[in-house]
Image (spheres, rainbow, N blue to C red):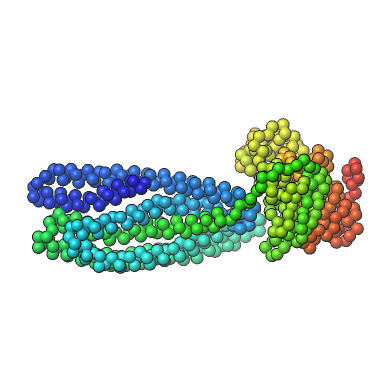
């Protein structure tokens, strides 16, 4: 791209001089054919290399943009759940799609800015070669041109920053609205939500007008300065021609060079593109500056999956959610985590598998701090099931085996059957090969597919974060039997709001007021009225479910 731009610039600078010599040759009737042929050849070269330059620039911009998007996406995924706490999903999409496209033009923008400066500088030198007075006449007006460029860059940079920031805000609100589209439709708040999403439009309009106003102002001032410079130089050139100091061809070349020397519009266009790229690059750098999750290199020893929380403090948006919490989850035990809303149950579950790092303290698995474990080692040891699972992958087989790389069909089917997902998957048009995007499923069905995925993952520890929320009573009972039977060799940490689930647990962790309120069996804790209140309103009047060796009774 640099080579083609240099060639174009060289030909552009040479062409007025050659055309001037051609005019002199025609007037003197001397070597006319040679100079006409040379002028034609230069014009042909200019056209060809201009096409090549556009093609090379397009390829360079596409590759730069692709590299930026891959880099930014990899970094966002490396940030994990922290990414969406620091930036909204819509804002990240805006940065990853629109901002990277503009930033990808940065390299070509730098080349164009440099190359757009070369013709004016070369034209000034050419004017000096033709006649020094032409050059001095032009240089008198150059400070005005420099002031125009400087004021434009200052004004347009501020407008660009505000424009892209508001654009990201609108994208974030739109993403939220699309995620809650059913709620919006059910609440009949479509018009109100549309107004909320588009509320920043006046500000976006204001910043957009600011950019165009900056362009308009500099264009208006340039329309005043440029003609005056052109007229002044041509007037001097006419005087020099009348005195025989320059030829008619020199007069033609001088008129072309002075137009080239005051080609402020090309400079401003390149500067504007560069200013936009600089602004969007800053938005991308803001994400890249967030440090990714750092993993260690240690491996786990043989062990039952014992989790230990040592003096763990984890902050929320309004202060500590869990504070100086110490807890041991016995290896191989079924442990239920209960507590009122906001007590930190899901946060505890996230800390258990290092989806979140504590602000203070540490979490250990079989005696090894999670921070010191290699990424692959940690992920092999932990399996998660979530309240609202997102089904990733092309097909339902992919969704169940997601993250495993390879897994036998028999294993997928066995775990889908354990999660009571096999029956409805087989009734789909292509069974397990049905495309997730083309086959809608209910909340309960998605929950069961998410459970099947967690079961397939294996590992020492299975963490289920309120996975029974969308399950019917029969399915929930079946899953409980799987947890106490086929999966009894794992440590199972289950966040739950159901008394029936807590009743089947070997140990209940009752969270309240930022820490562990009590530990014990469901039956022992049931005597406390405040414990019973955590299961309101469904369990307030019910007797506790007692569990023996043979199951519920």
- Residue 176 seen by the camera: no
Q: Position of residue 189 (x, y in %)?
A: 62, 60
Q: State the residue at coordinates (19%, 55%).
A: 253
Q: How many marks?
A: 0
Q: Give the residue drawn at x 81%, y 45%.
A: 331
Q: Which residue is nearer to you in this view: 330 or 481?
A: 330
Q: Is residue 277 left or right of residue 454?
A: left
Task: Work out whether 69 lies above or below 209.
Answer: above
Residue placed most toward the observer, 275 or 180: 275
Is residue 219 among the parts visible in the rendering? yes
Quarter where residue 186 is shown: bottom right
| Image coords of residue 347 (percent x, y) | 72, 55
- Left or right: residue 38 versus residue 87 is left
Residue 12 location, x and y as percent? 26, 51
Residue at 63% x, 54% y: name it.
Answer: 82
* On screen, residue 210 above or below 450: below
Residue at the spot 50% in from the left edge and 65% down from the top edge:
203
| Image quadrant containing the C terminus | top right
Above or below — where is 409 with respect to 207?
above
- Residue 540 horizontal side relative to residue 66, left or right: right
Tell which of 471 and 227 is nearer to you.
227
Image position, residue 486 (x, y; %): 81, 38
Q: Nearer the viewer, residue 201 or 126?
A: 126
């Amino acid at each position: 791209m640099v080579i083609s731009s240099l060639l174009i610039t060289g030909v552009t600078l040479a062409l007025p001089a050659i055309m001037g010599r051609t005019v002199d040759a025609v007037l003197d009737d001397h070597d006319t054919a040679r100079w006409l042929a040379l002028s034609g050849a230069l014009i042909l070269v200019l056209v060809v290399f201009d096409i090549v330059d556009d093609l090379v620039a397009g390829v360079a911009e596409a590759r730069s943009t692709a590299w930026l998007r891959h880099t930014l996406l990899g970094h966002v995924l490396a940030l994990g759940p922290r990414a969406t706490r620091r930036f909204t999903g819509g804002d990240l999409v805006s940065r990853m799609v629109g901002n990277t496209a503009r930033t990808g033009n940065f390299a070509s923008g730098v080349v164009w800015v440099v190359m757009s400066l070369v013709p004016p500088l070369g034209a000034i030198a050419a004017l000096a070669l033709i006649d020094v007075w032409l050059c001095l006449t032009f240089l008198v007006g150059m400070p005005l041109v420099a002031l125009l460029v400087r004021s434009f860059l200052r004004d347009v940079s501020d407008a660009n920053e505000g424009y892209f920031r508001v654009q990201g805000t609108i994208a974030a609100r739109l993403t939220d609205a699309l995620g809650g589209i059913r709620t919006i439709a059910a609440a009949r708040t479509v018009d109100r939500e549309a107004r909320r999403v588009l509320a920043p439009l006046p500000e976006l309009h204001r910043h957009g007008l600011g950019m165009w106003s900056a362009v308009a102002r500099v264009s208006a001032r340039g329309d005043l300065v440029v003609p005056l410079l052109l007229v002044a130089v041509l007037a001097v050139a006419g005087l020099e021609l009348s005195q025989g100091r320059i030829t008619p061809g020199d007069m033609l070349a001088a008129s072309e060079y002075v137009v080239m020397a005051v080609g402020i519009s090309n400079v401003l266009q390149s500067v504007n593109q560069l200013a936009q790229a600089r602004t969007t690059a800053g938005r991308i750098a803001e994400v890249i500056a967030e440090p990714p999750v750092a993993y260690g290199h240690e491996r786990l020893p043989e062990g039952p999956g014992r989790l230990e929380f040592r003096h763990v403090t984890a902050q929320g948006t309004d202060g500590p959610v869990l504070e100086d919490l110490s807890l041991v989850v016995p290896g191989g035990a079924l442990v239920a985590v209960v507590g009122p809303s906001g007590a930190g149950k899901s946060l505890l579950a996230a800390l258990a598998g290092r989806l979140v790092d504590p602000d203070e303290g540490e979490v250990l698995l079989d005696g090894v701090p999670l921070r010191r474990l290699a990424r692959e080692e940690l992920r092999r040891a932990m399996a998660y099931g979530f309240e609202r699972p997102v089904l990733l992958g092309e097909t339902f087989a992919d969704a169940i085996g997601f993250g495993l790389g390879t897994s036998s069909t028999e294993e997928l089917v066995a775990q889908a059957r354990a999660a009571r997902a096999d029956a409805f998957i087989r009734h789909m048009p292509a069974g397990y090969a049905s495309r997730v995007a083309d086959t809608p499923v209910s909340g309960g069905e998605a929950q069961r597919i998410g459970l099947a995925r967690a079961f397939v993952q294996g590992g020492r520890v299975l963490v289920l974060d309120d996975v029974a929320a969308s399950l019917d009573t029969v399915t929930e009972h079946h899953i409980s039997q799987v947890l106490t039977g086929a999966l009894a060799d794992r440590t199972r940490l289950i966040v739950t709001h159901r008394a029936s689930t807590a009743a089947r647990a070997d140990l209940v962790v009752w969270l309240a007021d930022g820490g562990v309120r009590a530990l014990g069996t469901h039956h022992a804790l049931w005597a406390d009225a405040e414990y019973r209140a955590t299961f309101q309103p469904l369990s307030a009047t019910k007797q506790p479910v007692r569990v023996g060796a043979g199951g519920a009774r």
